[in-house]
Image (cartoon, helix red, strand yellow):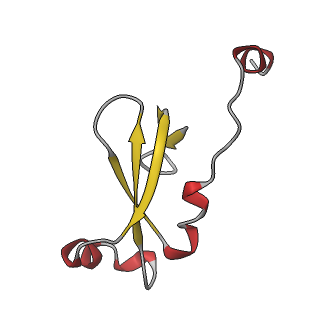
Amino acid sequence: MFAWRGSPAARSEDLFQVTGARVGTLKPEELMKLHRMGEHPAVVTLMPDEGDPIRVAVASEHTQAALVRTPARSPAADAATR
């Protein structure tokens, strides 16, 4: 599951069910726009269960965290947390 919020002050977020992910490198023109993300930002391409792949830029120190899989939750567990 990938949760996306446009900014910390945004009032809504999008959720995507992700079936796979891979780390890649950014193109030189993309790197210029992301100079505030540290020395070696990368891109993680997420494959959602529906739709086109989603490319997300990440700071190099967060690359592996973006690939962490969390255990699937059952519908009963989700209902218990509401």
Residue sitting at the far left = 29
- The answer to whether residue 22 of the structure is visible from this angle is yes
Q: Is residue 1 left or right of residue 70?
A: left
Q: Position of residue 47 (x, y in %)?
A: 39, 42
Q: Position of residue 42 (x, y in %)?
A: 41, 70
Q: Position of residue 8 (x, y in %)?
A: 52, 51
- The answer to whether residue 12 of the structure is visible from this angle is no
Q: Residue at x 71, y 37 (%)?
A: 71
Residue closer to the observer: 13 or 72: 72
Residue closer to the observer: 31 or 25: 25
Q: Residue at x 23, y 73 (%)?
A: 27
Q: Is residue 81 above or below residue 1?
A: above
Q: Is residue 29 left or right of residue 65?
A: left
Residue sitting at the far right = 80
Residue closer to the observer: 39 or 18: 18
Count of labels in the image: 0
The part of the image, by quadrant, that contains residue 49 is top left
Q: Position of residue 4 (x, y in %)?
A: 47, 43
Q: Looking at the rendering, in which quadrant would you find the C terminus?
A: top right
The part of the image, by quadrant, that contains residue 81 is top right
Q: Residue at x 55, y 57 (%)?
A: 66
Q: Residue at x 36, y 28 (%)?
A: 50
Q: Is residue 48 left or right of residue 81?
A: left
Residue sitting at the far bottom = 39
Q: Looking at the rendering, in which quadrant would you find the N terminus?
A: top right
